[in-house]
Amino acid sequence: MTIFVIWVIAFVLILYFANKRWDSGVSRGLDKVLPEVLKSHGENRVLWVGVLAVMGATTLVRPIDILLVVILLAIIGLVVGKLVSLAAGKAEH
């Protein structure tokens, strides 16, 4: 129960501060990090603030879980990238 309370407090604080500072820097910082397809350009404020709050609170409470998910996604991305390049190479012949 304590972990849940800490997560909720972190979620609310991150949500509040990210929403408060959206126009003064969070939106621009997010656009610098994301690829062109995912850039918000100041729109989708509620969606991105919610995502940042969930990810931030989870990272604060369970950092190892987030690290393992990132590693797993990176491995899946590498495998998919290799398969796509292999398929593209076979399609040329």
Image (cartoon, helix red, strand yellow):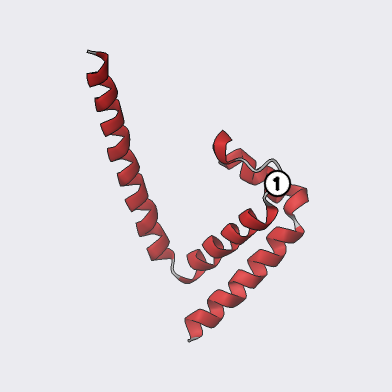
Residue 72 or residue 86, whichever sits in front: 86
Residue 84 sits above or below residue 75 on the image = above
Quarter holding the C terminus is: top left
Residue 3 sits above or below residue 15 on the image = below
Say which residue appears at 26% left-offset and 33% top-offset: 83
Residue 57, quarter of picture:
bottom right
Mark 1, secondary structure of its residue = loop
Residue 87, quarter of picture:
top left
Residue 42, quarter of picture:
top right
Amino acid type, callout 1 = Glu
> Where residue 61 sits: x, y (%)?
48, 71
Residue underneath mark 1: 43
> Where residue 91 sits: x, y (%)?
26, 19
Say which residue appears at 27% left-offset and 14% top-offset: 92
> Where residue 41 sits: x, y (%)?
69, 40
- On screen, residue 8 versus residue 85, left or right, reads right
Say which residue appears at 54% left-offset and 75% top-offset: 7
> Where residue 72 sits: x, y (%)?
32, 52
Judge the density around disc 1: few (<14), some (14-19), many (≥20) Cα neighbours within 10 Å: few
Say which residue appears at 67% left-offset and 50% top-offset: 44
Q: Residue furthest top?
A: 93
